[in-house]
Amino acid sequence: MVQVNMHEAKAQLSRLGELACKGERVVIAKNGKPYLDLVPHQEEKRREPRKPGILKEQGWPEPEYRKFTEDELREMFGEDIIGPPNGDERRS
């Protein structure tokens, strides 16, 4: 491991960069305490675009949705939630 202070790092950046690229751990210190690690650049891996339904191929079950009856909806939400019957005007 190589540890240098900030001032030294400015003066020796090329050499420190070479060391880091060769696998050496380079630490830049500030006021005698480790402050930065100098590491080689790594290309960002390109991610594949997301494919909808990919889990379906793995045998994941389809979600089951059920329709509620009008009576169940009235019980859960009250009379006004259903709206007018058969498109007629609202009940009073």
Image (cartoon, helix red, strand yellow):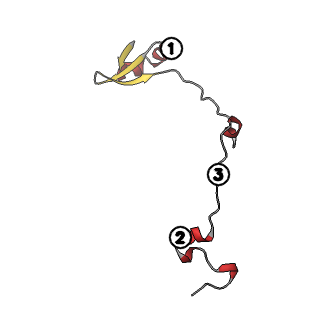
- Residue 8 numbered mark, or none: none
> Which residue has dot 3 on it?
64
- Label 2, label 1: how many angstroms apart (C-alpha)? 73 Å
Check disc 1 and give the amino acid type. Glu
> Which residue has dot 2 on it?
75
- Residue 18 numbered mark, or none: 1
Residue 59 placement, left or right of 34: right
**Residue 20 image offset from top left, x and y in percent:** 48, 16
Q: Point out the frontmost of discs 3 and 1.
A: 3
The mark nearer the N terminus, 2 or 1, is: 1
Q: How crowded is mark 1: few (under 14 residues within 10 Å), some or many (20 or more)?
A: few
Q: Do the residues labelled 3 and 1 touch (CB within 8 Å)?
A: no
Residue 27 sits in quarter: top left
Q: How crowded is mark 3: few (under 14 residues within 10 Å), some or many (20 or more)?
A: few
- Looking at the rendered structure, the secondary structure element under dot 2 is helix
Check disc 3 and give the amino acid type. Glu
Check disc 2 and give the amino acid type. Glu
